[in-house]
Structures are given as structure tokens and as C-alpha cells.
Image (tube, grey):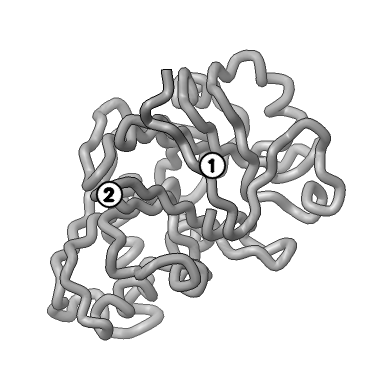
Amino acid sequence: FLGTGNAFADGGRSHACIHLEATGASLLLDCGGSSLPAIKKALDPATIQAIAISHLHGDHFGGIPFLVLDGQFSRRELALTVAGPPGITKRVEQAMDVLYPGSASVQRRFAMEFVEVQSGKPLAIPGAAVSAFPVSHASGAPAYAYRIEFTGATIAYSGDTAWDDSLTTAAEGADLFIAEGYYREKQVPFHLDVATLAAHRNELKCRRIILTHMSDDVLTNPPPGWEMAYDGMVVELDANRT
């Protein structure tokens, strides 16, 4: 977990960014605006093969322009795939040109491919098979929860969303479900609180749940019985489990 914070960096945490790594594969789930410093503390950004973006808010995709620019000036050679909801290409290119005019169209030293993920159509990206599930989060484009089949392990990720029954499908049988836990009980439109997650816990047939994207309400008064992510947290999943 490179970044586990919300849009306002409550608790001094970095924006959403989760690194999945296995032999021969390196993938990011989201890459929020403050992600590059967090990435550089943990790994070489030039080794990241792909990024799967859950939705088009800056605290979830805004780090891509900085990652791409870093790759250009560090003479990155490895190709980079950026997958996300419809509109990902335009939104990222607009962000790049706002932050660094002309950077979206510059000739890069490495290949970069944008892939628009469609719900119900599993997508193969380097190192993983990704399935997208529409969720309830207004961002000017569809928002997705993801189910990632990753070198023998299955990881589900809610992104940001109000409760949606599609989360049960995404998390079915998963080794790990990474779920938003924005507030303890307060219900905020388009976001998931811990009380609502608890009310649906029996429907989530996954082996483990870890909360992320938490506000100070959760961070300063942790809900008992819930595992909470923190920046720099490392979780190992056994692909050879029985």
C-alpha cells in the first residue's frame, strides 16, 4: 500500500496507490496525485508495467503525468499500459497539458498505451487479468471496482463508491478485498462507510478485507475488528494456498 489516504490526505497519507508485485509482473491500482514520491520510496518507477485506474478523480489518477514525465527524463525503456474507464485517455492527456503544456503530445522514449476498460469484458494487461464492475461514484465518467487475477491470487478493489451489489461479485472468493472505509458511520454520497460495509459483511465471500481511503473519523478512532491499511504496509498473498 503506497498510498491509503483520501482526497484531503487525512492523517498525512498519500493519495490512493497500491502496488501489486509478483515474479515478472508489476502493476499499480490507482495512481493519485501524490503517488510518485511514495512510489520512489518503495521501488523504481521504471519497472511498473501497467496501471489500472478505478475512476477519474485527481486523487486516483493525478499522479500519472508525473510518473510519465519522470519516465521520460530518467530514460525509461519499459512500455507502460494505462487502463481505466472510458474517457481515461482524454482526461490524462488534458491533465498532462495543464500541468506541463505540450507534454501529452511529446515523442516519448518508451511506448505508452491507453486502454479503456469496459464492464463485462475482462481485460488482459501485463501480469494480470482485470475485470471491471460499475459502481456508484460521480466522477464525470464511469467508476469501477476491479477484480484482478494476479499470478494465482485474486484481489478485489472497491475504488470509491457507495454500497453497490456489484461489490459482492467483485469480491467473490477473493484472497483480499481492498475496500473503501471513508467514515465510521456517517454516510457521504458516493462513498462507503464502515457501518455499511459491516452490514453487508456476510455477503462478501472473500478471505480478507483491508480498509483504505479513510478519513480522520476512522483514523483517530479505529473501528474494532477491522484491518486498516497504512502507507508502506506490505501484504503477502500465497498463490500456492490450498
Comparing labels 2 and 1, the label whose residue is closer to the camera: 2
How far from the left and from the top, in percent, is residue 116? 26, 46
How far from the left and from the top, in percent, is residue 230? 65, 54
The residue that label 1 is drawn on is: 137
- Give the residue drawn at x 38%, y 79%: 98
- Give the residue drawn at x 22%, y 47%: 126
Residue 72 marker: none
- Disc 1 residue crowd, few under 14, some 14–19, many 20+, Cα 10 Å: many
Q: Residue furthest right?
A: 221
Q: Is residue 214 above or below residue 44?
A: above
The residue that label 2 is drawn on is: 25
Q: Residue furthest top?
A: 202
Mark 2: secondary structure: strand
Residue 115 is left or right of residue 240, and the answer is left
Q: Nearer the viewer, residue 218 or 190?
A: 218
Residue 182 is left or right of residue 75, and the answer is right
Amino acid type, residue under disc 1 in the picture = His
Instruction: Answer with mark 2 or mark 1, whichever residue precedes in sequence.
Output: 2
On the question of residue 25 being in view, the answer is: yes
Mark 1: secondary structure: loop
How far from the left and from the top, in percent, is residue 170? 45, 26
Amino acid type, residue under disc 2 in the picture = Ala
Quarter of the rendering occupied by the C terminus: top left
Q: Nearer the viewer, residue 62 or 207?
A: 207
